[in-house]
Amino acid sequence: MPTNPLGSDERLVFRGTRGGRSARGLLWGCLILFLGLQALGVLTTLSFLSRGEFAAARSGLPGIAILAVAGGVWWALHRRPACVVTNRRVLLTRLLRAPIAIDVADVAGATRFVVHYTKYGRVVNSVTTNHVVIQLRGGGGHRTAPILEADQLRDLLQGVASGWIDLACLPDVDGGPARAFQRTDLFFALSSVVAGGRRGPVLAGPTRIVAFAQAPSPLRVAQLLTIVGSERSAADVETALAALAQNGEWGQIVTMEREERTLLVEGHQLVLVSSDHRVIFELAPADAERASAFTKPGPHAYR
């Protein structure tokens, strides 16, 4: 990010790639190309009239070089992120200008920008672009550059504005762990494999196992990470996730009591063992390591 570095306590939780359908992208591109070609033609014509054909041919080379350099600069600028979100701010990049910084607390909502085409006063076509309009609590708003992950950014900011998502609980885009994965008084993983089929998140709390049958959307993942990474006790987190079973939008959720059952880790497997049954969750190596630390006897504390 140019001219607006992150603070010492800021972490990058979302990075948007510039691209997608733009409100005026094609128009501006054609206009710039047309003006560049016109300027090159005028330069060559003037040189031909004043110094002859050979000199005119040579004089066109600087113009071509200038156009090439300008095109390279434009391409480099467009390869920058269109928008980044930290645990404290939303930063909107702009070409040749300083980014716009929006405090997370000022975000009131977000929506995709729609262009309406009219004819004789009637709307004849509507096109949803990849711009996202960020609405502010004090009124007004800001529109991002076109961004490929427009839906993901919109959902993220809507969740923040509604209080469902706490950006401080999300992982860094560069690999820093989420708070939910730093807890030792419970175990949480975003995915598992049961009976050869890929499943969704699994939580091992003090009294229950809560397992999701389907992988959640990015918005739901952020909500889960907010719940598990909050300052709630392990028992409260366990209850909150089990309560999601009442909401059909989360798909099938299975809750298993740990009473009279043993929870242990065998290799990369989290196993819930009873006298006549074993439920096995295949985990990623990093998740299995955290599960092993959780199942070891001893007191568990929130880190």
Image (tube, helix red, strand yellow):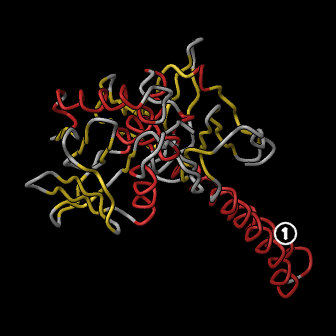
Q: Residues within 10 Å of mark 1 (few under 14, many from 20)?
A: few
**Residue 28 as seen in the image, left or right of residue 285:** right
Q: Position of residue 270 (x, y in %)?
A: 30, 58
Q: Where is residue 86 in the image (x, y as percent from the top left)?
A: 62, 39
Residue at 60 percent of width and 56 percent of height: 174
> Picture coordinates of residue 22 (x, y %)?
49, 46
Q: Which amino acid does label 1 sit on?
A: Leu
- Pick the residue in front: 57 or 111: 111
| Left or right: 215 in relation to 133 | left
Choose top left, top right, bottom left or bottom right for residue 91: top right
As rendered, which of 75 and 233 lies closer to the eye? 233
Against 2, residue 126 (above or below) is above
Residue for point 34% across, 38% down: 205
At x 17%, y 27%, the residue is: 246
Q: In this view, does 172 lie to the left or right of 201?
A: right
Above or below residue 32? Residue 89 is above
Residue 151 versus residue 288: which sits nearer the camera? 288
Image point 49% across, 42% down: which residue?
183
Quarter occupied by residue 265 = bottom left
Q: Residue furthest left?
A: 276
Of the 4 image quadrants, the one containing the C terminus is top right
Disc 1 element: helix
Query: Based on the displayed image, in which of its 4 quarters is residue 247 positioned?
Result: top left
Which residue, given by chain and number where applicable, does mark 1 sit on? 46
